[in-house]
Image (spheres, rainbow, N blue to C red):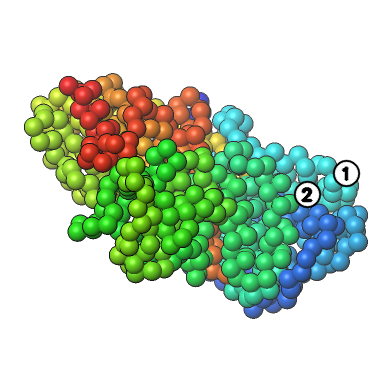
């Protein structure tokens, strides 16, 4: 596998997981602070002027072509990349003529007449930025390269339009500071240069801009475009009439959400200004936590002093709507890596209600009961009953990364030095990055634990690989950390389940490299990598995975998730009895 410059690898290794954890906290409404030439083009600041209408079959096909051509040019044309052209405004200028085109030949002529006003003048800049030859990196990596052979299809585009697009294919421009898709210092893609617009009811142009922006962003900058739940071009064709006919804000948001759901990317979430999707069933919550067991929502923990719900209860119905109905409805709006892995996206929706006292039908043992449950203003959070430290009556260390504070790992590992084993519970999302520090103790030599698919700055749609390393001495290399870490030689049991996601999955991949490590539980959700966000018209924020994460052998982790060494599942009977079956299995393995 291609090794890149040491400084670049250092930055990638050090900051990858930090990005994953903190990306949600960034302010994605801000631009880069500079007034670019495109910012002077303000004609459509208040709306597109293109009103909602039902599309004919010809219009759907014409808009489909417009979306693909507009997106390809957006990420390849030198004047768009440099910030000279306002490509949103240009979309609104050409869209009315596209909608009036009588057939596809007419649409081709409209597109060509439009694009001819933007001659392609630029040269490939390989080797200019940091002496990096991006084309060579891509060739040697051999990783994902988006199939854009459609630009050569003259039967689809017409000869002139095809030639125009092909003229940009070899312009490998790496200076993208002012581009709509720019890059962070360590090489991750950013969409902070995308502009937020209002989207008034019936503004079809703005609604379609939202679809075009999202569809092309995912097309060119998702490392997981090849594993969407449906063929991506078909998703666009299906979405066009729904988005165009939205008519109002709620319909627009739900239409875009249906497109998001087809990604299968469990990092893909849509947050609208009214939080319509988040508070779909109300702004209050049942006072409990749940797990999905055998396709049913099982109460695992309840708020202190809660008298109506009990651990082991199966939720059947809330305020007259069954849980099955909720789940099926929400599948339309949320990206699930697999059909049965829904908690990371839907848990709050399965517990929502409008009422201060909800009418809840439950199955308790063999008896179906209806209870009146006092609800909470905020969603209940699971409270781990086990604290970090040595387990009571056992010579076994326990680490819950969600409850760690700075300096805890060093103290705990000192306390654990003579224990028989350590249990690392990665069913809970880490509060701090643990991967490399724990690796210093439990992995005696440096091991490659993952390959990261990095977006190629100069080649939209291309990703190349970087190896990720964990183990003794890594912190010294990446942070010049001079501390010494005593090696831990006891057994290491790592726990995971459906709710192990992102940073948890990344840590599992790394820590299972320990020679005495065993992973126990059920498959993880399959949403590893960092989180990238982009604004869509109407103050809608969309997020997705921006980095590919693969096993050292190059196998996919996204959607399929990680597999345990030993499968172990929580059961309804175990929950009723107050047992943690995964923890019990871990203790058994150590003993």
The residue located at (49%, 46%) in the rendering is 266
The residue located at (30%, 58%) in the rendering is 287
The number of numbered badges drawn on the structure is 2
Report crowding for label 2: few under 14, some 14 to 19, many 20 or more residues within 10 A (C-alpha).
Answer: many
Residue highlighted by disc 2: 165
- Could you say which is closer to the camera, residue 348 or residue 516? 348
Q: Mark 1 or mark 2, which is nearer the start of the sequence?
A: 1
- Could you say which is closer to the camera, residue 586 or residue 424? 586
Residue highlighted by disc 1: 155
Report crowding for label 1: few under 14, some 14 to 19, many 20 or more residues within 10 A (C-alpha).
Answer: few
The residue located at (81%, 54%) in the rendering is 61
The C terminus, quarter of image = top left
- Could you say which is closer to the camera, residue 478 or residue 31? 31
The residue located at (67%, 58%) in the rendering is 212
Find residue 292 and report its image quarter.
top left
Q: Secondary structure at mark 1?
A: helix
Q: Is residue 491 above or below residue 498?
A: above
Seen in the image, is 483 located left or right of residue 123?
left
Residue 222: image location, x then y, percent: 57, 45
Residue 151: image location, x then y, percent: 78, 44
On the question of residue 29 being in view, the answer is: no
- Could you say which is closer to the camera, residue 222 or residue 522? 522
Q: Nearer the viewer, mark 2 or mark 1?
A: 1
Seen in the image, is 490 located left or right of residue 43?
left
On the question of residue 107 being in view, the answer is: yes
Q: CA distance from mark 2 to mark 1?
A: 14 Å
Q: Residue furthest front?
A: 367
Q: Secondary structure at mark 2?
A: helix
Residue 257: image location, x then y, percent: 58, 57
Seen in the image, is 500 located left or right of residue 82?
left
């Amino acid at each position: 596998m291609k090794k890149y410059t040491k400084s670049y690898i250092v930055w990638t290794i050090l900051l990858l997981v930090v990005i994953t954890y903190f990306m949600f906290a960034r302010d994605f409404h801000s631009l880069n602070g500079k007034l670019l030439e495109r910012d002077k083009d303000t004609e459509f600041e208040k709306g597109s002027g293109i009103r909602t209408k039902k599309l004919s079959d010809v219009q759907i096909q014409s808009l489909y072509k417009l979306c693909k051509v507009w997106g390809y040019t957006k990420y390849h044309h030198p004047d768009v990349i440099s910030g000279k052209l306002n490509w949103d405004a240009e979309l609104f200028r050409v869209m009315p003529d596209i909608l009036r085109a009588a057939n596809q030949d007419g649409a081709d002529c409209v597109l060509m007449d439009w694009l001819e006003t933007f001659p392609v003048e630029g040269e490939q800049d390989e080797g200019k930025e940091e002496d990096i030859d991006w084309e060579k990196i891509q060739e040697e990596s051999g990783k994902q390269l988006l199939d854009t052979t459609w630009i050569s299809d003259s039967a689809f585009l017409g000869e002139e339009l095809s030639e125009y697009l092909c003229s940009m294919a070899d312009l490998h421009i790496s200076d993208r500071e002012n581009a709509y898709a720019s890059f962070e210092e360590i090489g991750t893609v950013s969409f902070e240069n995308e502009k937020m617009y209002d989207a008034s009811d019936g503004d079809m142009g703005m609604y379609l801009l939202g679809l075009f922006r999202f569809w092309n962003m995912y097309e060119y900058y998702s490392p997981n475009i090849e594993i969407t739940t449906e063929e991506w071009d078909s998703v666009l064709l299906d979405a066009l009439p729904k988005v165009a006919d939205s008519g109002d804000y709620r319909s627009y948001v739900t239409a875009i959400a249906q497109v998001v759901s087809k990604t299968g990317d469990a990092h893909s979430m849509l947050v609208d200004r009214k939080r319509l999707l988040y508070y779909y069933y109300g702004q209050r919550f049942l006072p409990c936590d749940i797990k999905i067991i055998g396709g049913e929502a099982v109460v695992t923990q309840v708020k202190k002093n809660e008298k109506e719900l009990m651990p082991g209860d199966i939720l059947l119905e809330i305020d007259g709507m069954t849980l099955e109905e909720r789940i099926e409805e929400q599948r339309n709006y949320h990206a699930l890596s697999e059909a049965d892995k829904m908690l990371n996206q839907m848990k709050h929706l399965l517990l929502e209600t409008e009422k201060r006292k909800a009418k809840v039908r439950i199955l308790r043992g063999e008896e179906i009961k209806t209870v009146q449950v006092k609800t909470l203003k905020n969603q209940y959070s699971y409270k781990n009953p086990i604290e970090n430290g040595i387990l009571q009556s056992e010579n076994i260390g326990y680490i819950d990364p969600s409850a760690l504070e700075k300096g805890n790992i060093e103290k705990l590992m000192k306390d654990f030095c003579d224990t028989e084993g350590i249990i690392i519970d990665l069913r809970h999302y880490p509060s701090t990055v643990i991967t490399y520090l724990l690796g210093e103790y439990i992995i005696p030599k440096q091991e490659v634990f993952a390959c990261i698919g990095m977006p190629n700055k100069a080649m939209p749609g291309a990703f190349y690989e970087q190896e990720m390393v964990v183990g003794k001495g890594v912190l010294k290399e990446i942070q010049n950390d001079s501390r010494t870490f005593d090696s831990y030689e006891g057994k290491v049991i790592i726990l995971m389940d459906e709710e192990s996601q992102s940073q948890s999955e990344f840590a599992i991949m790394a820590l299972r490299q320990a020679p005495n490590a065993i992973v126990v539980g059920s498959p993880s959700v399959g949403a590893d990598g960092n989180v990238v966000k982009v604004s869509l018209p109407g103050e809608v924020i969309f997020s997705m995975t921006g980095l590919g994460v693969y096993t050292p052998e190059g196998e996919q982790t996204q959607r399929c998730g990680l597999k345990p060494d030993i499968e172990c599942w929580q059961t309804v009977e175990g929950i009723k009895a107050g047992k943690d079956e995964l923890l019990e299995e871990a203790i058994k393995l150590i003993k």
